[in-house]
Amino acid sequence: QVQLVESGGGLVQPGGSLRLFCAASGIIFSLYAMNWYRQAPGKQRELVATIFRGGITNYVESVKGRFTISRDNANNTVYLQMNNLKPEDTAVYYCNTKVGVDVWGQGTQVTVSS
């Protein structure tokens, strides 16, 4: 059974930083691309960042230069470093991978507010 568990969300002021963590189990982690999505109230879930098995990364335009996705295959963990946070980054952030079907974590709330 594949499980993804996120942590690291919280309340931060504009311009601040947070680091999200996603611990995976039940898969050979190094073989799979990993994704971070987010969903703000009243909006559709949005793909924020992807890291492929070889380490290549992709980002949605709105976070380029501010967010960094990385992975630690030895510890089955994917990270999302978020810098220079803006109020529009406020959302529930979800870790995701696709193993024939989409697998989601429970989400972690990120709130950017003064």
Image (cartoon, rainbow, N blue to C red):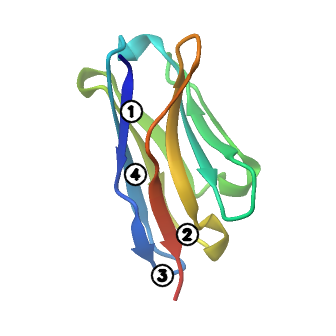
Name the quadrant containing residue 19: bottom left
Name the quarter where the N terminus is drawn: top left
Q: Dot 1 surroundings within 10 Å: few (below 14), some, or many (20 or more)?
A: many
Disc 2 marks a residue whose amino acid type is Leu
Closer to viewer: mark 1 or mark 2: 1
Q: Is 61 or 114 nearer to us in this picture?
A: 114
Instruction: Give left or right: position of 52 versus 76.
Output: right
Dot 2: element: loop
Residue 57 in the image, given as x and y percentages of width and height? 59, 32
Q: Which residue is mark 4?
A: 20
Task: Please tell me the numbered disc located at residue 4.
Answer: 1
Give the residue displayed 55% in from the left and 69% down from the top: 85
Give the residue displayed 50% in from the left and 24% down from the top: 55
C-alpha span from label 4 to label 1: 13 Å
Q: Is 4 or 69 nearer to us in this picture?
A: 4
Disc 1 marks a residue whose amino acid type is Leu
Task: Please tell me the numbered disc located at residue 13.
Answer: 3
The answer to whether residue 28 is above or below residue 75 is above
Dot 1: element: strand
Residue 18 in the image, given as x and y percentages of width and height? 41, 62
Q: Is 71 or 98 nearer to us in this picture?
A: 98
Closer to viewer: mark 1 or mark 3: 1
Q: Which residue is mark 2?
A: 85
The answer to whether residue 53 is above or below residue 84 is above
